[in-house]
Image (cartoon, coloured by chain):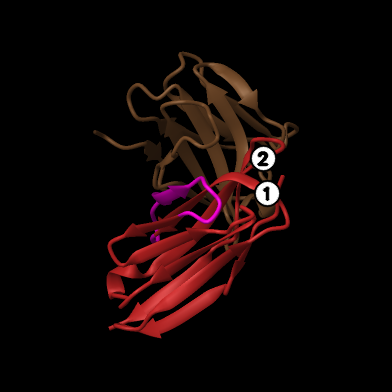
Amino acid sequence: EAGVAQSPRYKIIEKRQSVAFWCNPISGHATLYWYQQILGQGPKLLIQFQNNGVVDDSQLPKDRFSAERLKGVDSTLKIQPAKLEDSAVYLCASSLEGTPSTPLHFGNGTRLTVT
Amino acid sequence: TQLLEQSPQFLSIQEGENLTVYCNSSSVFSSLQWYRQEPGEGPVLLVTVVTGGEVKKLKRLTFQFGDARKDSSLHITAAQPGDTGLYLCAGVGSNDYKLSFGAGTTVTVRA
């Protein structure tokens, strides 16, 4: 089966600019996650979708981050305006079910550098 | 959110040696997962442990879940350069039922 697709692979922007990331999950996976992985740290959940509804966005900085999954398949994550501390790898993951113990399938991530 | 501490942070060994990495917490987990992440890629699930005291083997990798379900270890026998990567543990809290990741152990196996 095809894996989780993410684009772009790399992005360099200046602070206060905006940026968007795209994710296409594994076909049939109802649950989609966006994680932020800062260098030297483990992935931190930003938002979880079940189909096109938000299940958990408690750790999403909503003043600058937004995400949508309008048709319950692809998803985009946007940052506007970006800050230096947003430099990280943004990982998208999907799973067949939304239970926490269900294995996650990760994409290769988008590495964002904010200068 | 549960705090998972992984140790050591970095580990560099020669091919053929054994290694053990640890994942510890003061919280109880209903299940715990181990992932390996290679540079430029996303984490890949290795194993899920559910029962306290459970031991699972995956070729040269042995995973153990503590009796109290607060800690776990990963032991690699006769490490190979292909074992190089960031090993992440992730636990599902028994109270909030949320998945939290540790910071990982970076393992380098030299040929």
Which chain does tag 2 point to? B
- Say left or right for B70 vs B40: right
Prevailing SS of the magenta stretch: loop
Palette colour of chain A? brown
Query: Which residue, given by chain and number where applicable, does mark 1 sit on?
Result: B28
Q: Residue at x 57, y 72 (%)?
A: B9
Q: Residue at x 51, y 45 (%)?
A: B50
- Magenta range is B38-54
Which chain does tag 1 point to? B
- Say left or right for A99 vs B85: right
Where B40 falls versus A63 (above or below)? below
Residue at far left of view: A1
Q: Residues within 10 Å of mark 1 (few under 14, many from 20)?
A: some
> Between residues B31 and A32, which one lies in front from this camera angle?
B31
Query: Which residue, given by chain and number where applicable, does mark 2 sit on?
Result: B94
Rendering coords of residue A98 (x, y %): 51, 26
Same subunit under labels 1 and 2? yes
Rendering coords of residue B108 (x, y %): 40, 76
The answer to whether residue A45 is magenta is: no
Q: For the residue labelled by badge 1, is the local secondary structure a helix, a strand or a loop?
A: loop
Quadrant location, the N terminus of chain B: top right
Q: Residue at x 43, y 70 (%)?
A: B75
Residue at far top of view: A71
Where A47 falls versus B70 (above or below)? above
Palette colour of chain B? red
Residue at far bottom of view: B14
The residue under label 1 is which amino acid type?
Val
Q: Residue at x 68, y 44 (%)?
A: A16
